Image: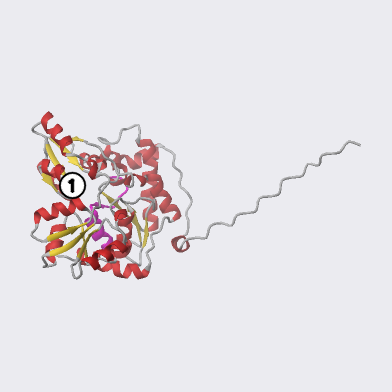
Amino acid sequence: MEAQLALRPAPASPLRSPAPLTPAQQRYGLLPMPDLAWTPAVERATAHLYDKVRDVIPSVEWPFFAPYVKAINELKAQRGAVILAHNYQTPEIFHCVADVVGDSLQLARRAAEAEQDIIVQCGVHFMAETSKLLSPDKTVLIPDSRAGCSLAASITGADVRLLKQRYPGVPVVTYVNSSADVKAETDICCTSSNAVQVVESLGVDRVIFLPDEYLGQYVQSQTRVRLILWKGHCEVHERFTGAELRAYREADPSIQIIAHPECPPDVLAEADFTGSTAHMIDWVKSRQPRRVVMVTECSMADNVAAEAPRVEFVRPCNLCPHMKRITLPKILDSLVNMREEVLIDPAIAERARLPIERMVNLKA
């Protein structure tokens, strides 16, 4: 008798338990994803925002951005959230959904002053950590926790402890582009806009300055205080070269070159002005040069161009891959699902908060 092949149904897959809710999700709940269709109503609601960016965002791209812009602006009001955006964010974020924009010092100060219970940090992870340190009772979200920083990754708290053993009694000044673990080993923080002021405020003849070597070399050129430096670099700014800038000037001797102090010394030597992102923006708006090379992350030129239409920007375009992880869809997801929440070990946070507060409270 021929054997019969019995066909048995495949065993049912075990049901996966839903992921546990995070503290922020438990507190605020989840919201349904809004409709993201491009409609006449969306076009009308966002027309005033597109007027701000029409010179830097092609009209063919706006129907994709606009539904997200409208949904984000409605949801942040519903959530009671404030969106902080660094100068390196793209124009559709910087001009269309951000409530506060600026360099790392400006964002740090505004984070400390924020009245809203929810802060959405459109920048890199150390900036979100800084906001959490200054507002420990608030919920701080970053749309993509993978948005890191080569400078922050160049040094650890253990490295700082070893330096303090090597140079006992020498105060530590740390650039805010660093992790909370590093800040916890620090006496006072600084940004590129106030680094010289911070170094000189300590009233000593020698400091450990971390982690950006090029920023430290620039600060050293501006002060008599001796700086002990670390070899950390920004992966965006270290790619610029002095030869590249000389070629721009040879092609057009009238061109103006402005550079961020995280750039190598040969780049700064070619610059007509060196300053933080905030100072570079102010320089362009006040001087209104005919043509300018803005030697920093590429998106900042787009953001300034939207507000200075008479200035022609020559873009040696280096993009920060970490900043570009922050997008409109991720910001919307962050507000809908209350993620990704920034949490810091309380033992580290207590020590890391003090050097930031010292910086923020330093008299200008």
In this rendering, position of residue 71 left or right of residue 134: right
Q: Which residue is tagged 1?
A: 260
Q: Nearer the viewer, residue 96 or 193?
A: 193
Q: Nearer the viewer, residue 231 or 216?
A: 231
Q: Pinpoint residue 270: horizontal percent, then vertical percent.
A: 11, 40
Residue count near mark 1 (Cα–Cα under 10 Å), binned few <14, some 14–19, many ≥20:
many
**Image quadrant for the C terminus?**
bottom left
The magenta stretch spans residue 75: no
**Image quadrant for the N terminus?**
top right
Q: Pinpoint residue 219: horizontal percent, then vertical percent.
A: 13, 55
Q: Pinpoint residue 108: horizontal percent, then vertical percent.
A: 25, 59
At a point 37% along the width and 40% down the height, the residue shown is 65
| Residue at the outermost front position | 166
**Residue extent of the magenta highlight:** 95-113
Q: Pinpoint residue 81: horizontal percent, then vertical percent.
A: 35, 57
Query: Please, which colouring scheme is shown?
Result: secondary structure
At a point 35% along the width and 64% down the height, the residue shown is 138
Q: Secondary structure at mark 1?
A: loop
Q: Does residue 312 show up? A: no
In this rendering, position of residue 110 left or right of residue 335: left
In this rendering, position of residue 302 left or right of residue 347: left
At a point 35% along the width and 34% down the height, the residue shown is 61
Looking at the image, is 28 positioned above or below residue 8?
below
| Residue at the outermost right position | 1
- Amino acid carrying label 1: it is His
The magenta stretch spans residue 96: yes
Counting labels gives 1
Q: Does residue 181 show up? A: yes
In this rendering, position of residue 298 left or right of residue 287: right
